[in-house]
Amino acid sequence: MVSGGDAHPIEQESYRIMRARVDFSRWPAGAREVVERMVHATADESFSETALVGDGFVAAAMSALKSDAAVVCDSRMVVAGVPLVASRIPVECYLDRVPTAASGTTRAAEAVQLAAAEHPDRAVWVVGNAPTALHRLVELYDAGVVSPAAVIGMPVGYVGASEAKAKLWESPLRAISVTNTGRRGGSAVAAAALNALARLAWY
């Protein structure tokens, strides 16, 4: 359990308060721990209502982590939020390899393109910032360029975030993805979802 006996007393109390305020019972085991961690990390209870968890997401992501699959993140902020994961398996961000973007695209989208060339199969993809990164990932999947093990798609913002997440959820990747509806998202919630999976897989 995410807030088990090895957790700090403050974390245990925080989970107690959160569970008294939010009903997580509609989520099955596994998905429930992921959504709880998303809410806990952000204190944003709306994630309990807007989260979307694919039927095969938890099992697929846990299997990938247990087999030491690479984790590809769209931003350094996500990488910084998952030190437990990074201490055990490769966690990579390709944004530094794209100092500038070509006209009509973004650095985040081009970074995903580079990452897909090096990790075409079985990586766990974590998008917590850029809608264009998630949009490009789905495009590359549709083109047969990349086949993720699992996708955490939580970009944030007023431009394109809702649409990119809807595109993910409407794609065949839905079964192995977690996302949410609306503009909210961000590196903290994306990292929280990955951290929950790591605890489920390794502890």
Image (cartoon, grey):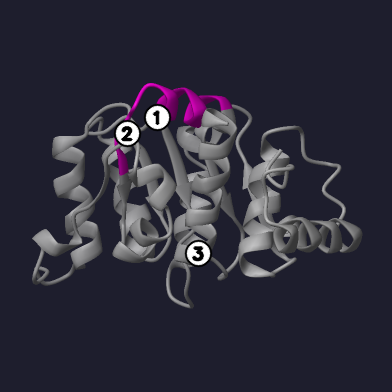
Residue 105, quarter of the rendered image: bottom left
- Give the CA separation, mark 1 to mark 2: 5 Å
Relative placement, left or right, of 17 versus 83 is: right
Above or below 80: residue 54: above
Label 2 crowding class (10 Å Cα cut-off): few <14, some 14-19, many 20+? many
Element class at badge 2:
loop
Q: Residue furthest right?
A: 20
Q: Position of residue 124 (x, y in %)?
A: 38, 37
Identify the residue under disc 1. 149
Q: Is residue 94 above or below residue 118?
A: below
Quarter in which the C terminus is drawn: top right
Crowd class of label 3 (few under 14; some 14 to 19; many from 20; radius 10 Å): some
Q: Position of residue 110 (x, y in %)?
A: 17, 57
Instruction: Give SS at disc 3.
Output: helix
Tell me the residue at 47%/74% (across/down): 157
In the image, is residue 70 part of the stretch drawn in magenta? yes
Q: Using the image, tell me which numbered label, if any, was put on residue 188.
A: 3
Q: Earlier in the sequence, mark 1 or mark 2?
A: 2
- What residue type is disc 1 on? Ala
- Mark 1 or mark 3, which has the lower sequence index? 1
Mark-to-mark CA distance, 1 and 3: 21 Å
Residue behind mark 2: 123
- Residue at the image position 34 percent from the left and 45 percent from the top: 86
**Residues drawn in magenta:** 59-71
Question: Decide: marks 1, 2 in contact (CB < 8 A)?
Answer: yes
Taking the spot 14% from the left edge, 48% from the top edge, the residue there is 114
- Residue 83's place in the image compared with 62, above or below, is below
Q: CA distance from mark 3 to mark 2?
A: 20 Å
Q: Are marks 3 and 2 in contact (CB under 8 Å)?
A: no
The answer to if 46 sits in the magenta stretch is no
- In the image, what residue type sits under mark 2? Ala
